[in-house]
Every structure is written in structure tokens, then in C-alpha cells.
Amino acid sequence: MSATELPQRSFRAAITRFTVVGFVALLGVLVSTGVLMAMSQQQTRAIVHTYQVQRELDAIRLTTTALIGARLSNRLSASHRGTQRAAQLQAALEQSIVRLGQLTNDNPRQQARIPLLMASAARVERKAGLDVPVEAPAGTMSDDPGDVIAALCTAMMDEETRLMDARQALRTELGRDFFIILGLTGVLLAVVAILTYVTVNSYTREIAASRQALHDANTGLEAAVRERTTELMRVNAEIQRFAYIVSHDLRSPLVNIIGFTAEMESATQLLRERLDMALAERPGTVSPQVETAITRDMPEAIAFIGASAKKMDRLINAILQLSRLGRRALNPQWLNLEDVIKAVIDTLQVLVTQAGASIDIVQPMPELLADRVALEQILANLVENAIKYRHTTRKLEVRIAAQRVGDRVLIAVADNGRGIDPRDRERVFDLFRRSGVQDQSGEGIGLAHVRALAYRMGGSIALESTLGEGSAFTLTLPVHFQDTRALESGELLQ
Amino acid sequence: MTEHLPLNIVMIEDDAGHALLIERNIRRAGIANTIRHFSDGTSALEFLFHGQDGPWHNGPAMVLLDLNLPDMSGTEILQQIKSDTKLRRTPVVILTTTDDKLEMQHCYDLGCNVYITKPVNYESFADAIRRLGLFLSVIQIPDTQ
């Protein structure tokens, strides 16, 4: 898991980094744009201001010219109206100069020229109107106030034009800076976008690759399971065949052992008759050892050989039976579990009655699709065991209950018998293994048989038991039995 | 039963002990016919089909056949006997340890005349062989010639 976690973490870190860089860049653009705009606006205001100054200068120039004109015409024909107009113009001129002074109060160089303008304006009146000689103000080339005003206005105009040019240049520069910043930001955003794209893309590829890997692993797993299943089936078939062959080939020498033991027994019988004759007719000719050999040792040996061979035959038959069990084709059909249990109890009725047992079938019982014979064999074995291994002093009570859980049916056969030692709880399902006091006949086949059948039907069997109190076997079977070995059983029967 | 059938008994049995027990018990049933014993399938087939005193060349016989032979299955010998025009009427008694139902069915399908499982219990075995001996003494076999 850590292998997939690591790229994920680095992916998250990269994405966070790119997002932060992108936002910082945008913020930078916002701030610098704001600053540039403010600066640009200031320049614009300054330019507007310059225009106002220029307009005022033009007004002064025009008013001065008009004033001079008015004075001249007054001098030729003085009239009330003319005088009045000159006074108006004079006032307008002075107002313009005052406004100019106000407008240029941020510029000392322009401000310095204002008093001179004022003085010259005053002189226009005197010179043109009253014809009073006035000395020209110091620092001026001409003593004509009109010329002085015009010269001053031109100088001021030049100054304003110079300022205007500087401000225009600054504004252009600001505009350029703005575009440079905009361009840089664009580049930065493009870089962030590309890096993000690359990261996301590689991450997506990684995800796709890991998904593919997962898919491959799954497919591989399925194949592995299929392979294992096939192998298991083959091994199982092999074991079946093996058990079958072994049991048959083991039986063959047994026929000899038992057969010749019997021959030997009848031969011993003859010897015994001869011995009896000899003892009767010529006592003392037979040594006690020979007598012991014929009367005790040989029959003893023969009896043991015979008994062992017969026991071996029973064991071999058990193996054979189990192997046949695995070879039998199952025939699944819908079964009413209650009917099956009742049929089983009926066949065991003699034993049940002898034991004085009470058997309780808990209602209701589910239905299931299973092989009837196999199910009957399992239940018969379990009930028979309950009867066989009942408690010596208690009345036997067997309780059979069943319930459906999901797609499986659980069948429980519980008794109040002598119970099974915890150590033997797995062993009892092994072939030829038994538990507790060996006071009952049997070879230890029943539960091995039960388990083999349960497995064969796709189920399992479990045991819970308390020694001295009782045992409970739980058979778990699928509700719908599907014979996965249906195809294979043909091969097994060959 | 004054007249013995001029009948050879061909016993094909790989286990010497079984062969001895079978022969002994047949004799105990009072059967005196010649018993030819073969312990493998190849030599048995050779005698059946090509032996000068074998049944193909020389008259009626009956075959006691074990199914588990070292070199071939007894069913193969059975099949060969039953598919031969001359030998197919020869009675074949399968005497084997296998009591598998399918095996039994297979043998009867191939045309075996009697199928006997060797009982492990010796009394039953001896009894079965003795009964077989009695059966042999009354059986009528067509002349193969």
C-alpha cells in the first residue's frame, strides 16, 4: 500500500505548490496593476491640470490683446461703453492671472512668473489708457507690457509643454510596465498550467497503470484459482483411484492369508487327532513341547492370524467404501428436509426403541437441493452415533434442527450423550479414529464417511461437544447443490 | 455323473496362492479335469489361441479368469475370447476380488458367463469354489469343432 501512497502524497504536494504559485502570481498582478493604475491616474490628472494651465495662459493672452485693443480704441474715441469694456477686460485679465497663480502653486518656476504677469497686466492699463510712462520691470527686454505678457505666456506655455511631455512619457512608461507585468504573469501562469498538466497527466497515467496492474493481478488470481482447482480435482481423482487400487490389491494377498490359515487350521486339526491317538496308545513317546505346540501354540497363532486378517479385511472394505463414495455420481433434487429426517429415523426405529431415545425434530424445516442418498447417509450416521454413544444413565434426547442462513442450510444434530473429549474433536472425523471408551462395535468409519459426503456435497461438518454432557454436529450444505465434478466423475469411473 | 466331460479348465490367475486354493477346492469338489494354470495374460492368450492342446485347436474348455493381471486386464482377455468365432461359446467364469458393480456390469456386457467375487472369508471362498466345481460337473458345452 505504501508504494501507491507515496506518489499520491507527492502528487498532492505538487498540486498544492502549483496552486499556491498560481494564486501568488495572480495576487501580484492584481497589486501591481492597482499601483500602476493609481500612478497612471495621477499622471492623467497632472496632464489635465497642464491643459487647464495652458487654457488659462491662452485666455490671458487673448484678454491682454483684447485689452490693448480696447485701450487703443478708447484713446481714439473715449466712450462710456469703451471704458466700461476695458475695465471688464482688465478685471478678467487679473482674475485669469489669479487663477493661473492658483493652478501653478505646485510649480515654483511658474509661480515666480505670476507677480511679473500681475505687474505687466497693471501696466497695460496705465500705458494704453492714461498714457503714463511706466518703467519697464527689471529683467524684461521690452518695456511693452503686451509683449512682456506674451513672452511670459510663451515661457509658461513652454514650461507646461515640457511638463506635459514628461508626464506623457511617464504615462507611456507606466503603460509599458503594465504590459510587461501582464506578460510576465501570463508566462508564469502558463508555466504553472503546464506543470500542473504534466503532474496531473503523469498521475493519471500512474493510476491507469496501477489499475491495469490490479486488473492483471486479478486475472492472474482467477487463473491461479482455476489452475489450483483443476489440480485439486486431479489430485482428488488420483487419490480415489489410488484408494480403489490399493484396496483391491490389498485384498488379494488377504485371500491367501486367510485361505492358507484355514488350510493350516484343518491341518492342525489332523495333527491334533494324531497327537491324541499317540497320547492314548503310546504315552510318553510325545514330548511335552510338541504337545504344547500342537494343542496351544499353533491354534493360538492361527486364531490371531485369522482375526487380524479379518480385521484388515474390514478396514480395506471401509477404504473401498469411501473411495466408492467419491466416485458415485450425485443426483441433486429438491428435498423437504423434514421428510428426509423422518425417513432416516424410520430406518433406525429399532435402535431408537431399544435405546428408549426421544428424537425431537424442530419445525419448520427448510427445503434444499441436494443428493438424497448422501444426505440420508450423513443423517443416519449422526443419529446412529448419538444412539451408540449415549450416556449410560441418562435418557437419550436427540434434537434435530435446521435453518437457512443466506445460501446455505445449517442442520444441527444435538444429543445429551457422553460427549467427545476436546482432544478428539478433529480426530473423530479421520478414518479409523474413534474416541472415548471402546465399548461399541465399529471401525471408526462413520464420521470420516460423513465428512467425505459433506465435502462432496459442497458443505462441511462441525462439532461442538462437552465431555459428559453431549455433542452437537452441525452440517452446513449449500441450498443449491451444483456438482462441480459432474464432468469429471465420468473420468473417475473409468 | 459317471462320465467326465472331456473338458480342460484354463485358469488365468496371477496369484499363486489363489491358484492353489482354487485348484485344491475344485479337486475337493471331485472334479478331475485337467487344469492349466497361467499367471499372466500373454501366455494365457497364446495357449488359448495357438496352443496345440489349447481350446482353439483342441476342443472344449472353460476359462477361470482373474481380472487383475500384471500385463493386461482380464476384461481384455474376455473380450478377445468373446469376439472370436470359435472361442466365443467357451464359458468364462470371472473369479476376482473386485466386487465393483460397474466392473461386473462391464464383464457381463462383454459376454462373461459367470461372475464370482473371491470372498475373503475362507469358508465362503472354499464353498464358492466347491459349488463352482459342482457347476462345472453339470455344465454342457458345445463342441467347438
Image (spheres, coloured by chain):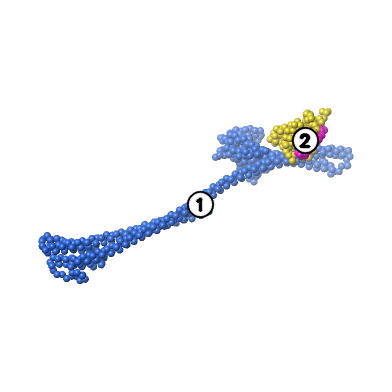
**In which quadrant of the rendered image does the C terminus of chain A lie?**
top right
| Mark 2 closeness class: few <14, some 14–19, many ≥20 residues within 10 Å | some
Front-lying residue, A28 or B43: B43
Callout 2, which amino acid? Phe
Q: Colour of chain B?
A: yellow
Q: Position of residue B31 (x, y in %)?
A: 81, 32
Q: Position of residue A176 (x, y in %)?
A: 35, 60
Position of residue A222 in the picture relative to residue A293 (left or right): left
Q: Position of residue A225 (x, y in %)?
A: 59, 45
Q: Which mark is residue A206?
A: 1
Q: Is residue B31 magenta?
A: yes
- The residue carrying mark 2 is B49
Indicate the secondary structure of the residue bearing disc 1.
helix
Indicate the secondary structure of the residue bearing disc 2.
helix
Position of residue A467 in the picture relative to residue B11 (left or right): left
Q: Name the residue at 27% across, 63% down.
A: A161
Front-lying residue, A132 or A436: A132
Question: Residue A85, located in which quarter of the rendered image?
Answer: bottom left
- Look at the picture and state if A215 lies above or below A114: above
Range of magenta residues: B27-56
Question: Residue B142, located in which quarter of the rendered image?
Answer: top right
Letter of the chain in blue: A
Position of residue A331 in the picture relative to residue A23 (left or right): right
- Does any portion of residue B89 appear in the rendered image? yes
Callout 1, which amino acid? Glu
Q: CA distance from mark 1 to mark 2?
A: 77 Å
Q: Is residue B28 magenta?
A: yes
Front-lying residue, A318 or A207: A207
